[in-house]
Amino acid sequence: MQPRFVARLGVADAVTAANATLGFVAVVAATVDVALAARLVLLGAIADGLDGLLARRYGGTAAGEHLDSLADVASFSVAPAFLVTVIAGDAWGLESTLGGVAVAVSAVFVTAGVVRLGLYTAYDTGNDHTEGVPTTLAATLLAAGVLAGVTDPGVVVGATAALTVLMVSPVTYPDLLPRDALAMGVVQAAAVLVPSVFSRVFPKALLAWALAYLALAPRLYWRPEGKRS
């Protein structure tokens, strides 16, 4: 007896499922090494971009869009939220008032990510834009920040709160052009493979790029194609 997914899922769906796995492994890694967890989140972002390329090259499946959003919940909502909770817990203690605030902010971040991904699947799939900050971008900002040395718990929790609001905002974000997505993927890969080389140049470059896109893309970056969730 064959599993149900045989002949129903494609190569892009396999990469999407791997992205979900990376999200879980990032959560486990955060309990040991937050930098490793951040690298796994960025690796999930690379997988998220790769599954879109594979779907365009080999064709998607009926389940693909739903699998993509489910995987993104694990990698770009739960994993970064847990990473933030660990950073805050190590500094403040989760039993403290500030620790409780950090847990609450992280929990709402997950909720906003789930809502944002559900709305994306329902209304934005197939468009060249989406409303609200993409979960992939939010997770990339948090993970790149950690690897770049931004680990002050107040800053991290504050950034998480701001991204929570922005994910469910009506601000319209254009999808990336393939060439720009590829360039970002190269920087992400370098940040994953050699995060500490040259005084953390690659995580810092990725953080700067992500911040620029966050602030400027709604007004200055418009083009006809791409994919970002």
Image (spheres, helix red, strand yellow):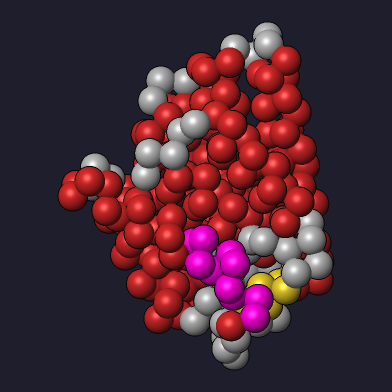
Residue at 44 percent of width and 65 percent of height? 209
Q: Is residue 218 magenta?
A: yes
Q: Is residue 61 left or right of residue 26?
A: right
Residue at 49 percent of width and 31 percent of height? 152
Q: Residue furthest left?
A: 198
Residue at 39 percent of width and 58 percent of height? 206
Between 16 and 169, the residue placed more toward the observer is 169
Residue 64 x, y percent position in the rendering: 63, 63
Q: Residue furthest top?
A: 95
Q: Quadrant of residue 61?
A: bottom right
Q: Is residue 21 above or below residue 86?
A: below
The residue stretch that appears in magenta: 210-219
Residue 222 x, y percent position in the rendering: 60, 86
Q: Quadrant of the N terminus?
A: top right
Between 133 and 124, the residue placed more toward the observer is 133
Res 200 seen here: yes
Q: Is residue 146 above or below residue 60?
A: above
Q: Is residue 179 magenta?
A: no
Magenta span dominant secondary structure: helix
- Total labels: the figure holds 0
Q: Is residue 59 left or right of residue 115?
A: left
Residue at 53 percent of width and 76 percent of height? 176
Q: Is residue 227 above or below residue 185?
A: below
Residue 149 x, y percent position in the rendering: 38, 39
Q: Is residue 166 left or right of residue 33?
A: right
Q: Is residue 121 above or below residue 139?
A: below
Q: Is residue 216 left or right of residue 109?
A: left
